[in-house]
Amino acid sequence: MQGVQIYRPIIYGNSARMLTQEEKATMRCPADHTHQWTVALRSVASQPTNGEEPGAIVGGKDDLSHFIRRVTFKLHESFASPNRVIDRPPFEVTETGWGEFEIQIRVAFVTESGEKPISMTHMLKLHAWPIVKAIQDDSRLPLPPPVQFWQYDEIVFNDPHENFFNTLTNHPPTPLPPPHLGAGNARPIPWHPSWPKSVIGDGSNVAGEGVGTLRAVPGFHSQLSKMEGDTLKAAVTELKAMLDEARGTMDEKEKELAALKARQA
Ligand code: SLL
């Protein structure tokens, strides 16, 4: 479809948490492994929380397999078979390890789309150093919360095949809720690992919040409430109407011309 552009929002990134002593004992992973992490490519909207901490699972509500066929995560060579090919959702890899490194994420689209694969790079993040430091500095604070490190992005398809376009518009992404405002009338707190207070409450900003309350709810916001599919369909209908009208005008003009010519003859 010439001139049509359609995009799908996604997030990619990782969560990571420190292994407890018991886990290290029972998980039979190498002794130097300190963290369990998950690298993933997901929908932006998150599942409703099932009692776990809000923000514990970021994104992943929508199934993306109607347009994504395969995601390949290329891990550091210190991992066994570093090329991890994931052919069905969830598009993610969970591992244990000790170090941070760059992960290549290659996304292949469904064959019908005719779209070329795309690649992006994610720096695996295990440590939120400022938080680790804040915790060291303040004994009242609990163990570090899991790290959430995600990139919001939009995959743009230019001039999509009509079938693919229809597939996409038949699976609209879940609209995002308005920005999370925290408890009470607190100002929005953008979450970022470099800002410990955005993750762990210090009992000062939000009414009723105690020291050490996990505050972070990584939020992704976009003007997605208006689905571009509907907007585009409306635009196409409008264009068709304009075209019909123009054709009508042209027919009239042609008739006038013919009448004039007949009179001249
Ligand atoms: C670093 N450049 O030196 C990085 C490399 C490698 C991470 C990090 C263990 C893999 C395994 C692992 O976490 N490797 O032994 O299964 O920080």
Image (tube, rainbow, N blue to C red):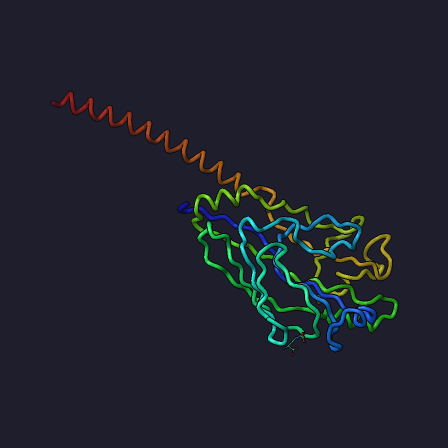
Q: Nearer the viewer, residue 178 or 66?
A: 66
Task: Judge left or right: residue 113 versus residue 243.
Answer: right
Q: Which quadrant of the view contains residue 245?
A: top left
Residue ID at (85%, 55%): 209
* Ligand 1 sits in quadrant: bottom right
Position in image of residue 127 (x %, y %): 72, 70
Q: Residue, x 65% and y 61% (percent of image)?
A: 150
- What quarter of the picture does the N terminus occupy? top left
Q: x, y (%) of residue 44?
A: 63, 52
In the picture as drawn, the residue positioned furthest to the left comes out as 265
Query: As displayed, is residue 231 above or below residue 191?
Result: above
Nearer to the camera, 180 or 98? 98
The residue positioned 79% from the left and 67% from the top of the image is 144
Q: Please, is residue 128 above or below residue 63 in the view?
A: below
Percent coordinates x, y for residue 214 in the rendering: 80, 59
Measured as percent of width and height from the top left, residue 227 is found at 56, 42
User: Which residue is nearer to you in this view: 96 or 260?
Assistant: 96
